[in-house]
Image (tube, rainbow, N blue to C red):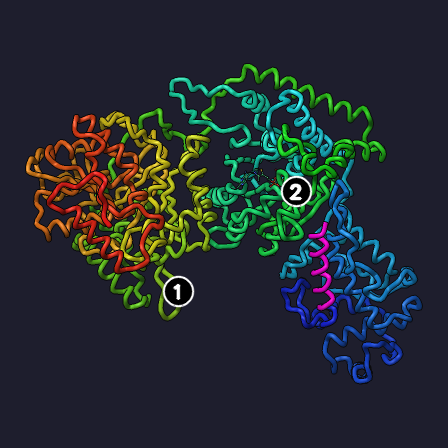
């Protein structure tokens, strides 16, 4: 494998360079794992006493080429000084002379040892610690061409075969593991044996990139001094049992469903005993709940054998399954998904007698896309279970070798791992490294030596393990659990295995990997290897093995028979916190969202008050004073305050609020200021943390995120799915950047409920608006979200307020809101209903400070007669009718302009300027699902009006293509006009979302307004510019 050789060559050169420079030239992060001053490398008081009594040996006798004249003289002088007074030399030299000189003189076997030999020996030890993994026997197929590892070659360190039985002084070290064993004198042979055993067996450890000395010592202790093979007979029987289950499960599926795709685990069966032992160990160490994310490979096996989903259910689903039946309730099955994508959760007992809750998160085919969701869900579990230490809830991600190296979201997720508002105290990553990705070899699939190299950026230890050695797999899986519970950070297990069959069971792998598959054909399964090993060692009898095999086979057969009559009953989508929530088949009461005036005032004061001695920036001080006045007078409430009021009132009602995204604390447009900074001390104050007495620190969380869309949105989505009593929001810097997270929108947010029956009320804030900021800061691509909306453009659903289920039945809501009060209500509406739906908010930029974009406090309250209060009470307005107090029928209106978002204010202004009192302007605040009832109400109000859709976006973008058929459907039902009677005013079709020239922008914008107000009728196909 040329790629591998090249990589090791580079590493070799790097090491040579470092050798030449000597240790003191390497930085603390350069892989040494402990501070580099010699003084700290040697033991002091405790071990000094154990060192042999020093006897003077002139250093000049230890002549060596590197001791040129000057340095040997220097050393002799030092030695003389030390002999006269040990405290006169640096502690390092004191230690050196005590240990080295004394030892060298007392032991005849080492009398010939030179200083350079001693140093080279230490470098050799280090080389094993750093590069031993390169010599480890990781590939079960033995195909990996790793070549000899020069860094581990004795010759490089000046030793030869002849030195093997010489004794060498290694010294005593302030580090754990091999060098701590207080065996300062050893033969080279025994030193090498230990190093080979620890680093070059069936586990390759990579950890020397970790800069933390304590962590390296912890690992060294476990790697160099522990013999992982010391399992009891009982333990081995359990491992064998688990491996048998794993292997026979796949065999069973293969015989029953010969032609089905199941993405079997064959070749990597040791994953199952590894995972189970990892979970058992984690449970012993305090873990109570594990969230699992995994791809297709081996998913059914994990579901059956690890998560313990009933086998009969798995088999039933695998046979095509029956749709769930719920007595007394409707059938909520969604569109479903292929069997290897479904999620589930169960409690299972552990070997140590505990119970552990396991949830496997449903996922799409998009590899690795589920990663951030798993981490987000884990974090939410930690919040709700007050798991402050993050030791009770843990996330585990299983990856493929190709996808772990190739998918960017892996890196985006890894980079959340230590951020204060995103950390979960460590995710365990388990890579099922079958050394192929579909038909692609690693040499074409990645530039790094290992598929796991990306994790090195995070200082995560990486344990590469030969997947044929089940005990080694079990050992590293347990070690990973211990690491996570000890250091609360990520860790990676790279299970090097193979794929016995094709990518799926009907693929022919020899087309592309002929040599590999010649070897695989004759390669025994890990189960038979283990059985053989245990038989040979006499630990287990043939009868034991047969008994285990027939037990497993019998159960599998029984469950298969039972699967035929299996009828799923449980409403699978309901997890604990979601009890009482409604499926789309059950009507949910629509609730008002107005708040009592006194609560508004009280929380209003809390969120506009800064602590007395706090010294904010003077502009911020002014903003807070203005906000306080808005609350006081009730007048001129702006966007930011309305949002804060929505958050605060939800918190008062006991909900958790979490807002995350790039720069959200201040707000991209410097409008939110949810965290204020003391200009003298730098201290921070978040008013929304002080709404209720003894408010939990995290109850309101606002957090700037890493510069990632995919990772962070995925995280928040996972977070939102844990508990419905939370308002979780993700804000894009500009809506246009949200497409970096397109997979989350496409695969999860828009379709997750339909596919997996999992609800979420996640809110996405996507700043947009045409104000001349160019193509990536204007559009937000509302058309993408509308195109994914699943309401039928040609069918008007039941719209009667008491029977309406329109929102429940659609996949999500897309709004473009124009008043602060309406924004307040749409946020509150998210939680004031018995179901959850994602909400896409095309949020404003220039409306944040627009003089007319203000609301009165009375629009937020629930008082009869106040402006927000309509027939049903105070609620989010899906459509805002014309502000000119038109009667129920206005025959004198010649044009009805329907629009959405900030263009309304520009249209209103243009109407005033042109004195077009015969034009009515309505704001479609909720684009999807389409407010047929309110649109029809307005159509009826203006019987003679020309109907216009006005937008700022180019014709092939914006809401036009969504609105057009629906508006026509609404008109047709009223017997009014045809499709050509929906007139368009907006920009011409365009490839780019917006112009980069501000003068062109102004011209285009004027043309839109001009056209919207033109006296002559608007042509169907015409458009601005
Ligand atoms: C994002 C994404 N791109 C492409 C695919 C198509 N695909 C399915 S499996 C696969 C290979 C995966 O290889 P690896 O991660 O090594 O897992 P393995 O199948 O070997 O277990 C590919 C490319 C996909 N599912 N998701
Ligand atoms: Mg693979």
Query: How packed is label 1: few (under 14 Cα within 10 Å), some, or many (20 or more)?
Result: few
Query: How packed is label 2: few (under 14 Cα within 10 Å), some, or many (20 or more)?
Result: many
Query: Within 8 Å of ligand 2, the CB of disc 2?
Result: yes
Does residue 622 show up magenta in the picture?
no
Q: Which label was assigned to residue 513?
A: none
Q: Nearer the viewer, residue 867 or 288?
A: 867
Does residue 5 show up magenta in the picture?
yes
Q: Is residue 260 left or right of residue 703?
A: right
Q: Residue furthest left?
A: 892
Q: Nearer the viewer, residue 697 or 368?
A: 368
Percent position of residue 34, x then y: 67, 64
Which secondary structure, mark 1? loop
Percent position of residue 626, x then y: 22, 60
From which residue to which does the magenta span run?
Answer: 1-17
Q: Nearer the viewer, residue 46 or 906?
A: 906
Which-is-in-front pick, marks 2 and 1?
Answer: 2
Percent position of residue 922, x then y: 18, 41
State how far apart marks 2 and 1 are (Cα).
Answer: 47 Å
Residue labelled with disc 2: 433
Residue labelled with disc 1: 683
In the picture, residue 722 is in which quadrant? top left
* Residue at x-position 20% and y-position 53%: 1006
């Amino acid at each position: 494998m040329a790629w591998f050789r090249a990589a090791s060559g580079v590493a070799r050169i790097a090491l040579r360079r470092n050798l030449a420079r000597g240790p003191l030239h390497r930085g603390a992060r350069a892989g040494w794992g402990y501070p580099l001053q010699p003084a700290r490398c040697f033991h002091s008081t405790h071990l000094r006493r154990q060192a042999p009594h020093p006897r003077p040996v002139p250093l000049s006798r230890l002549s060596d080429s590197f001791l040129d004249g000057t340095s040997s003289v220097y050393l002799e002088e030092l030695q003389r000084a030390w002999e006269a007074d040990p405290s006169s030399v640096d502690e390092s030299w004191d230690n050196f002379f005590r240990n080295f000189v004394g030892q060298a003189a007392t032991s005849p076997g080492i009398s010939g040892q030179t200083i350079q030999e001693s140093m080279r020996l230490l470098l050799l030890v280090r080389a094993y610690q750093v590069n031993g993994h390169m010599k480890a026997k990781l590939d079960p197929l033995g195909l990996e061409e790793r070549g000899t590892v020069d860094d581990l070659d004795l010759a490089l360190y000046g030793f030869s075969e002849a030195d093997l039985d010489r004794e060498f002084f290694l010294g005593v070290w302030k580090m754990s593991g091999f060098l701590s064993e207080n065996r300062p004198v050893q033969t080279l042979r025994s030193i090498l044996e230990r190093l080979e055993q620890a680093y070059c067996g069936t586990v390759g450890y990579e950890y020397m990139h970790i800069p933390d000395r304590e962590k390296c010592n912890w690992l060294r202790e476990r790697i160099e001094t522990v013999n992982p093979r010391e399992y009891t007979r009982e333990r081995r029987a359990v491992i064998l049992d688990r491996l048998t289950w794993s292997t026979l499960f796949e065999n069973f599926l293969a015989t029953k469903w010969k032609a089905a795709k199941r993405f079997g685990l064959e070749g990597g069966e040791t994953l199952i005993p590894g995972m189970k032992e990892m979970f058992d160990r984690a449970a012993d160490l305090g873990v109570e709940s594990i969230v699992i994310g995994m791809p297709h490979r081996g998913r059914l096996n994990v579901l059956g054998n690890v998560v313990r989903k009933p086998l009969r259910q798995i088999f039933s689903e695998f046979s095509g399954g029956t749709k769930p039946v719920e007595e007394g309730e409707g059938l909520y099955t969604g569109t479903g998904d292929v069997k290897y994508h479904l999620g589930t959760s169960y409690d299972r007992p552990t070997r140590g007698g505990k119970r552990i809750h396991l949830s496997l998160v449903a996922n799409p085919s998009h590899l690795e896309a589920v990663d951030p969701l798993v981490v987000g869900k884990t974090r939410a579990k930690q919040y709700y279970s007050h798991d402050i230490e993050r030791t009770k809830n843990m996330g585990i991600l299983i990856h493929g070798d190709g996808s772990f190296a190739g998918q960017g979201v892996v890196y985006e997720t890894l980079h959340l791992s230590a951020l204060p508002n995103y950390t979960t105290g460590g995710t365990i990553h388990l890579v099922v490294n079958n050394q192929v990705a579909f038909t692609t070899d690693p040499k074409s699939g990645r530039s790094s030596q290992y598929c796991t190299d990306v994790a090195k950026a995070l200082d995560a230890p990486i344990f590469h393990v030969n997947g044929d050695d089940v005990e080694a797999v079990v050992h590293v899986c347990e070690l990973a659990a211990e690491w996570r519970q000890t250091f609360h950070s990520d860790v990676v297990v790279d299970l090097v295995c193979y794929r016995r069959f094709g990518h799926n069971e009907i693929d022919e792998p020899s087309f592309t990997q002929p040599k590999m598959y010649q070897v695989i054909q004759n390669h025994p399964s890990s189960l038979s290897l283990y059985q053989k090993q245990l038989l040979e060692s006499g630990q287990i009898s043939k009868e034991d093995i047969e008994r285990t095999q027939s037990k497993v086979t019998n159960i599998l057969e029984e469950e298969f028979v039972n699967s035929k009559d299996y009828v799923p009953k449980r409403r699978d989508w309901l997890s604990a916190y979601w009890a009482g929530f409604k499926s789309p088949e059950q009507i949910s009461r629509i609730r008002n969202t107005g708040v009592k005036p006194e609560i508004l005032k009280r929380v209003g004061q809390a969120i506009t008050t800064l602590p007395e001695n706090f010294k904010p920036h003077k502009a911020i001080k002014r903003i807070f004073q203005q906000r306080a006045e808005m609350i006081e007078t009730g007048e001129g409430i702006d966007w930011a305050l309305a949002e804060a009021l929505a958050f605060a009132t939800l918190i008062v009602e006991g909900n958790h609020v979490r807002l995350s995204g790039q720069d959200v604390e201040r707000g991209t447009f410097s409008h939110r200021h949810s965290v204020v900074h003391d200009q003298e001390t730098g201290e921070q104050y978040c008013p929304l943390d002080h709404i209720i007495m003894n408010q939990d620190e995290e109850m309101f969380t606002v957090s700037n995120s890493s510069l990632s869309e995919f990772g962070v949105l995925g995280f928040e989505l996972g977070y939102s799915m844990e508990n419905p009593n939370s308002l979780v929001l993700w804000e894009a810097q500009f809506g246009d950047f949200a497409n970096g997270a397109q997979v989350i929108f496409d695969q999860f947010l828009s379709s997750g409920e339909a596919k997996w029956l999992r609800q979420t009320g996640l809110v996405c804030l996507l700043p947009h608006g045409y104000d001349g900021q160019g193509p990536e800061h204007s559009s937000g691509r509302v058309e993408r979200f509308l195109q994914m909306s699943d309401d039928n453009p040609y069918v008007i659903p039941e719209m009667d307020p008491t029977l309406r289920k329109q929102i429940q039945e659609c996949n999500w809501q897309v709004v473009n809101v124009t008043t602060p009060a309406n924004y307040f209500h749409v946020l509150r509406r998210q939680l004031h209903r018995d179901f959850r739906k994602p909400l896409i908010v095309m949020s404003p930029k220039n409306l944040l400070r627009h003089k007319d974009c203000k609301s009165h406090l009375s629009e937020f309250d629930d008082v009869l007669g106040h402006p927000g209060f309509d027939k049903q009470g105070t609620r989010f307005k899906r459509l805002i009718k014309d502000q000119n107090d038109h009667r129920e029928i206005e025959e004198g209106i010649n044009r009805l302009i329907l629009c959405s978002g900030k263009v309304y204010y520009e249209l209103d202004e243009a109407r005033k300027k042109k004195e077009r009192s015969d034009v009515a302007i309505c704001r479609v605040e909720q684009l999807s699902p389409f407010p047929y009832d309110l649109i029809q109400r307005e159509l009826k109000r203006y019987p003679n009006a020309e109907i216009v859709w006005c937008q700022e976006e180019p014709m092939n973008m914006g809401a036009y293509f969504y609105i057009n058929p629906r508006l026509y459907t609404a008109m047709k039902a009223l017997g009014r006009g045809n499709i050509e009677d929906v007139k368009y005013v907006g920009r011409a079709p365009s490839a780019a979302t917006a112009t980069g020239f501000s003068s062109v922008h102004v011209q285009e914008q004027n043309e839109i307004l001009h056209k919207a107000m033109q006296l002559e009728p608007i042509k169907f196909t015409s458009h601005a510019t």
